[in-house]
Image (cartoon, grey):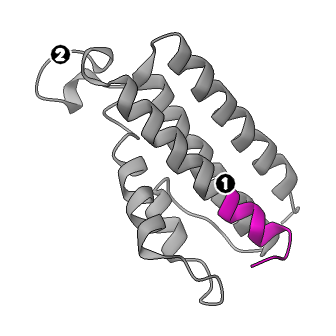
């Protein structure tokens, strides 16, 4: 497998930048989704560097599959769980009880998920730089 961790991390950072842009425009559902995507891609960068396969789209699921030497705290895992909840409902009206996704996601949620993604990206950068 060709090692492309830099590309995965660059795209993670770009997705996070786009999440912030979408939030400023009031597209909170997209800000939430892009935050999830940014975190997922950052973790996949780590898997690339470790020459491991990364299956699935769950931020939590990927974090818990990291080798034991990379201790992931409970708080970070809970933030990953919250990000995972934005993977489908942010995009599909039939995944929520009523209304369109843009009608139910809030600025507060977008800010919180962007912050979660920033933290997970920072954690992943620490691994990639050898500081973890």
Q: Which residue is mark 2?
A: 99
* Label 2 Cα crowd, 10 Å radius (few <14 / some 14-19 / many 20+): few
Q: Position of residue 125 (x, y in %)?
A: 76, 61
**Residue drawn at 53 percent across, 39 percent down:** 114
Q: Is residue 77 left or right of residue 89?
A: right
Which quarter shows the C terminus? bottom right
Which quarter shows the N terminus? bottom right
The answer to if 118 sits in the magenta stretch is: no
Question: In the displayed structure, would residue 93 be above or below residue 121?
Answer: above
Q: Are marks 1 and 2 in contact (CB under 8 Å)?
A: no
Q: Is residue 53 left or right of residue 63?
A: right
- Please identify the quarter of the rendering in which residue 49 is found: bottom right
Q: Which residue is mark 1?
A: 121
Question: In the displayed structure, would residue 62 be above or below residue 85?
Answer: below
Nearer to us in this view, 67 or 82? 82
**Residue drawn at 61 percent across, 65 percent down:** 54
| Kind of element beneath mark 2 | loop
The answer to if 130 sits in the magenta stretch is: yes
Q: Which-is-in-front pick, marks 1 and 2? A: 1
Q: Position of residue 86 (x, y in %)?
A: 38, 40
Question: In the displayed structure, would residue 110 be above or below residue 8?
Answer: above
Question: In the displayed structure, would residue 26 be above or below residue 50?
Answer: above
Q: Which residue extends farthest bottom? A: 69
| Kind of element beneath mark 1 | helix
* Label 1 Cα crowd, 10 Å radius (few <14 / some 14-19 / many 20+): many
Considering the whole magenta stretch, tell me its main secondary structure.
helix
Q: Is residue 69 left or right of residue 56?
A: right
- Please identify the quarter of the rendering in which residue 58 is found: bottom left
Q: Point out the stretch of residues depicted in magenta.
A: 122-132
- Image mark for residue 24: none
**Residue drawn at 78 percent across, 74 percent down:** 51
Separation of marks 1 and 2 at Cα, in angstroms: 32 Å
């Amino acid at each position: 497998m060709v090692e492309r961790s830099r590309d995965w991390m660059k795209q993670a950072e770009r997705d996070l930048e786009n999440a912030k842009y979408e939030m400023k425009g009031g597209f909170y559902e997209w800000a939430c989704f892009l935050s999830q995507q940014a975190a997922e891609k950052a973790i996949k960068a780590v898997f690339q560097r470790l020459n491991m396969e990364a299956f699935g789209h769950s931020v939590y699921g990927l974090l818990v599959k990291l080798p034991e030497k990379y201790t992931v705290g409970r708080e970070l895992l809970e933030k990953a769980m919250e990000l995972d909840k934005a993977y489908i409902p942010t995009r599909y009206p039939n995944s929520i009880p009523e209304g369109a996704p843009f009608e139910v996601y809030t600025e507060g949620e977008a800010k919180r998920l962007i912050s979660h993604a920033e933290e997970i990206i920072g954690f992943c950068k620490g691994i990639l730089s050898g500081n973890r």
